[in-house]
């Protein structure tokens, strides 16, 4: 009996840190950047979350940011999905607040399809919201105005050869043309927030009429929020974006209006 009491006391002792953490209200964020960027683009926003005691992982996708030395035209969307899946699995993260910006919306869609059981909440930050089997090019067409493709890589003309890091980088066009999987029933029921960054010279109403991602989010019953700023609002107002991310965790889906 004495040994049993000792064993139970040891179990309770080692369980205390876990119980304490679960009661603190602190979150674990995994943040995904957009096309041609890197985790560096979210450093200031992450600092705001870290200051409040949350845990933050700023993933950088293969071939971009500090992983630019791995750039290759053979990298596709699945490579980037696997980057984030492996981050979550190898860091053994659970109850993750997963956010993606811009192209990062394609990536987090693939991630939640693969490991929905690890995810607590999903936040699309001015991000692509695809249906199952869609590519980024299906959503937005081919390379945008002012860009071009060389040797299978989408070039970013505003980055010159002598530009010092951190900076954007060429990205494999396969990441834009490959299609995402999003048909896991467990993924479809996760709570999701879609955030549109709306500049002062635009209206949310007009944006909603032309934004297919916004429309898909509404049809799925996701919470839709707006935030004042341009497409990289996280660089304009990192504290505001961090606060919005924290507020969004309490959002819950409504009944979808379409399947």
Image (cartoon, helix red, strand yellow):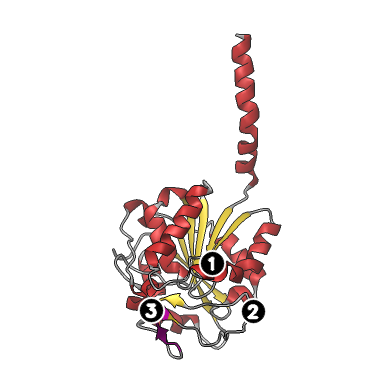
Rendered view: 208 above or below 50: below
Q: Secondary structure at mark 1?
A: helix
Which residue is painted at 31% across and 70% down in the image?
A: 134
Q: CA distance from mark 2 to mark 3?
A: 24 Å
Q: Quadrant of residue 147?
A: bottom left
Task: Report the number of discs.
Answer: 3
Q: Secondary structure at mark 2?
A: loop
Q: Is residue 4 visible?
A: yes
Location of mark 2 (residue): 164
Q: Nearer the viewer, residue 120 or 173?
A: 173
Count residues near mark 2 (Cα–Cα under 10 Å), then give few for <14, some for 14-19, many for 20+: few
Q: Nearer the viewer, residue 249 or 19?
A: 19
Q: What label does residue 67 carry, if any? A: 1
Rendered view: 8 above or below 71: above
Count residues near mark 1 (Cα–Cα under 10 Å), then give few for <14, some for 14-19, many for 20+: few
Residue 207 inside the magenta-drawn segment: no
Horizontal relation, residue 94 to residue 74: left or right: right
Residue furthest toward the right?
51
Which residue is painted at 52% across and 77% down in the image?
A: 169
Location of mark 3 (residue): 152
Q: Secondary structure at mark 3?
A: loop
Q: Nearer the viewer, residue 36 or 228?
A: 36
Q: Is residue 222 visible?
A: no
Residue furthest toward the bottom?
146
Count residues near mark 3 (Cα–Cα under 10 Å), then give few for <14, some for 14-19, many for 20+: some
Q: CA distance from mark 3 to mark 1?
A: 18 Å
The first of marks 3 and 1 along the sequence is 1
Q: Quadrant of residue 181?
A: bottom left
């Amino acid at each position: 009996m004495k040994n049993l009491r000792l064993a139970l006391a040891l179990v309770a002792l080692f369980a205390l840190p876990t119980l304490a953490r679960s009661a603190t209200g602190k979150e674990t964020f995994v943040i995904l950047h957009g096309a041609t960027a890197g985790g560096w683009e979210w450093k200031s926003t992450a600092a705001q979350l870290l200051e409040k005691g949350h845990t933050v992982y700023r993933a950088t996708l293969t071939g971009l940011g500090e992983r630019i030395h791995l750039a290759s035209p053979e990298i596709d969307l699945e490579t980037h999905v696997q980057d984030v899946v492996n981050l979550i699995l190898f860091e053994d993260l659970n109850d993750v607040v997963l956010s993606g910006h811009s192209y990062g919306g394609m990536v987090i869609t693939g991630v939640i399809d693969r490991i929905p059981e690890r995810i607590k909440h999903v936040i699309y930050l001015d991000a692509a919201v695809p249906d199952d089997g869609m590519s980024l090019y299906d959503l937005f067409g081919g390379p945008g105005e002012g860009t071009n493709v060389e040797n299978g890589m989408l070039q970013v003309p505003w980055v010159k050869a002598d530009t010092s890091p951190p900076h954007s980088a060429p990205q494999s066009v396969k990441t834009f043309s490959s299609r995402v999987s999003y048909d896991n029933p467990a993924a479809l029921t996760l709570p999701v927030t879609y955030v549109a960054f709306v500049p002062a010279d635009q209206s949310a109403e007009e944006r909603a009429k032309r934004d297919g991602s916004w429309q898909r989010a509404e049809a799925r019953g996701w919470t839709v929020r707006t935030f004042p700023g341009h497409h990289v609002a996280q660089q304009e107002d990192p504290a505001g974006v961090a606060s919005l991310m924290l507020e969004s965790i309490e959002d819950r889906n409504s009944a979808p209006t379409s399947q």
